[in-house]
Image (cartoon, rainbow, N blue to C red):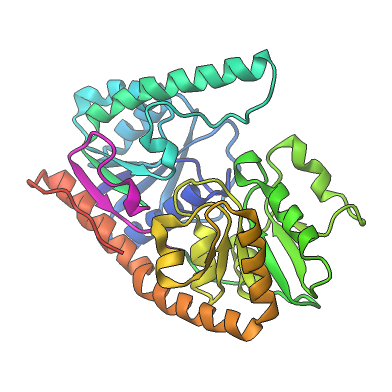
Amino acid sequence: MKVAIINRHPSDVLGGSEMQCANIAAGLSRRGHDVAYIAPSNGFRSSKAEPYRIIPVKPTPRDIAAAIVAHNADVIYWRFNKYYLLRTMWKLASEKIPVVFAISHINDTKVFSHYANPRSGVRSLLRTVKQLAASSLNHMGFRYVSGVTTLNPDFLNILPVARQCFVPNSVELQARSFSWPRPYVVWVANLKPTKRPELFLKLAAALAGKGMDFLMVGAIQAPEYEWIAKSGAEHAVHYLGPKSLEETNGIIGQALALVHTCRPEGFGNNFLQAWLQGVPTVSLGFDPAGLIAKFGLGGFADGRWDLFVSQVEALIANPDGAKEIGRRAKAFAEQRFSVDRTLETLESFLMEIVEDKPQAKMAVAT
């Protein structure tokens, strides 16, 4: 099967969906499929050797479509949100190549959505209006989509596509050794408004004096957070900067807990990186598929700040209890989020789409 994966590549942007696509591309290649990772980019950086082809293209419908046609793809796995979706589908209409759209973010399910940072001023307002208009236009592209996968079962059957399948995220656990002189909790994400890193600093201030350090990992992607990188005593958080996947795994694996302050999105890889290494998670406002609360994987505050602080404080006060929660999270994640399970589910769904078998809507319960 010749598969065209559409998304930015981790060599350009080290985000959750990009990491998932790289894992999927490598896994499908190992299973004997001919994979082309078509990466829209304004300046692609060189990458290490991969078991699949990387094809950098300009981020335009014409260039994306041309690369797909040149690959002679049997199926398209589109995980590039809704960017350029409709116009690319128009350009591919005569090729009759089935498209599987992968939901990576809750905004992918909405007719009107935007990713701009909300700021005051006419420029910001115009940018937001432009994104909302583009989102609604690209939503019409789903009429050309043959199937939908979602990383979060809560998003099943929202989009107007008949064939749908839950394909869980998975992560590779290669880790680089990490040590820190004191116990710590960690926050991992790129620093931008939707991730709300300022709330981790607020948490650190609220729990100062509890014998715990607060480590932050991620690239600064919005200028209003550049001050966090300053050294000194301006705040109670140790900012470690952007790290590789292996380094991040090592940092998470030694933490008492992973703290999550991001707004609802898709299904953060950082949850899996923590659970699979026996580290509990405490989330302020997002519990993907209700798993944290249902299976006791840490704490979910449901937006309540005082509860959030107390949940983290309880783990600090009872490290043995935190380890027990971590063991439960590890057993849970190993059963539900294996790399093999992800690949098998996705491979089967892609092949069914290619073969055009009649298929009822698919869902794998968690």
Which residue appears at 21% of the width and 57% of the height?
A: 348
Quarter of the image containing the C terminus? bottom left
Which residue appears at 30% of the width and 51% of the height?
A: 34
Of residue 110 and residue 349, the one placed in the foreground of this image is 110
Q: Say left or right for 317 vs 159.
A: right
Q: Which quarter of the figure has residue 146? A: top left
Q: Indicate yes or no whether the magenta region holds residue 228.
A: no
The rendered magenta stretch, by its main secondary structure, is classed as loop
Q: Position of residue 20 (x, y in %)?
A: 44, 54
**Residue 238 shows up from this direction:** no
Q: Position of residue 183 (x, y in %)?
A: 74, 77
Residue found at the very far right of the displayed protein = 232
Which residue appears at 25% of the width and 56% of the height?
A: 347
- The segment highlighted magenta reads 152-170
On screen, residue 140 above or below 55: above
On screen, residue 44 above or below 294: above
